[in-house]
Image (tube, rainbow, N blue to C red):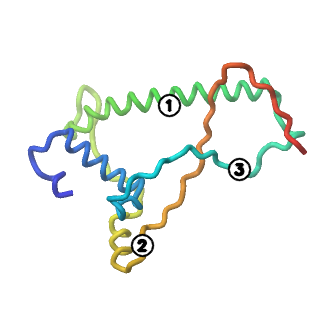
Amino acid sequence: MFQLLMPGKSSQSLARAAARAIRSVIAPATLFTPAAPAPAVEPVTAPDPAGLYEPDEMPAVEDIEAAARTYHAAADQARRADRGKRAAKKILDRLPAGTYAGWKVERVASGRQTADLDEIRRIFKQHGLGPVPMRASAPSLKVSQVEAPAVLVAVAA
C-alpha cells in the first residue's frame, strides 16, 4: 500500500497495484498460500433455484423466446454502457473537483459499508484461525442464443 502513495509512480504500476488489491478481496484464500499454484477452475453449473414453474404453469414458447430476446438485448446494452462508463471515468477520475462546461464533477462519501478484509485476515492470522471463510455469490442468469431452434423439453412430473 505504501507504494501506491509514492510520487512518480506510473499509471500502469498504480493499475497493477489496484488489480492486486481487488484480487485480494475476490480471492483472499490465495493470500495465505502464495507459493501454491492456482488450481484449474472448471465452469460449474449452479443448481436450479426454488420457485420454478411447474409443468402446468409453463409460459408459451413465444413468451419465453420474447423474454430471452429482451434479456439478451438488455444485457448487451448494459455491457456497452459499462464500457462507455469505464472509458469516461478514466478521464473524469483524474479531474479536480469543479464545474466543466455545465457538468459538475465532485467526489462524495459513500454510505455503503463493506467488511475490512485486511483487518479480518489480520485477526484470523493473529488467532490462528486459518483462512477467512468465504461463500460463493448467487448464481448469475446467463441467456445465449443457440444455432438451431431449441425443442421445448417436457419436464417429468
Q: Mark 2, residues whose alpha carbon is within 10 Å: few (<14), some, or many (≥20)?
A: few
In the rendered structure, are the residues bearing label 2 and label 1 in contact, judged by CB atoms less than 8 Å apart? Answer: no
- How much space separates mark 3 and mark 2, taking CA atoms? 32 Å
- Between 140 and 149, the one lying in front of the other is 149
Quadrant where the image shows the N terminus: bottom left
Q: Position of residue 26 (x, y in %)?
A: 42, 53
Label 1 sits on a secondary structure element that is helix
Q: Relative to 6, is 146 on the left or the right?
A: right
108, 67: nearer the viewer: 67
Percent position of residue 149, x then y = 74, 20
Identify the image quadrant of residue 97.
Answer: top left
Tell me which label, 2 or 1, sits earlier in the chain: 1
Q: Few, some or many C-alpha atoms within 10 Å of disc 1 (few <14, some 14-19, many ≥20)?
A: few
Q: Earlier in the sequence, mark 3 or mark 1?
A: 3
Q: Mark 1 — residue?
A: 78
Name the residue located 39 percent from the left edge and 74 percent from the top edge.
Answer: 124
Of the 4 image quadrants, the one containing the C terminus is: top right
* Residue corresponding to mark 2: 130
Report the residue that reaches farthest toward the top. Answer: 148
Assess whether mark 1 and mark 3 are in contact (beta carbons under 8 angstroms).
no
Q: Position of residue 142 (x, y in %)?
A: 61, 36
Horizontal arrangement in the rendering, residue 79 relative to residue 43 (left or right): left
Comparing marks 3 and 2, which lies closer to the viewer? 2
Instruction: Report the residue that reaches farthest toward the bottom.
Output: 127
Residue marked by disc 3: 49
Residue 22 drawn at (x, y percent): 35, 50
- Identified at 11% across, 51% down, the residue is 6
Image height of 102 relative to 57, above or below? above
Can you tell which quarter of the image residue 151 is in? top right
Compared to residue 122, the image places residue 67 above or below, namely above
Q: Quadrant of residue 74?
A: top right
What secondary structure is found at the residue carrying circle 3?
loop
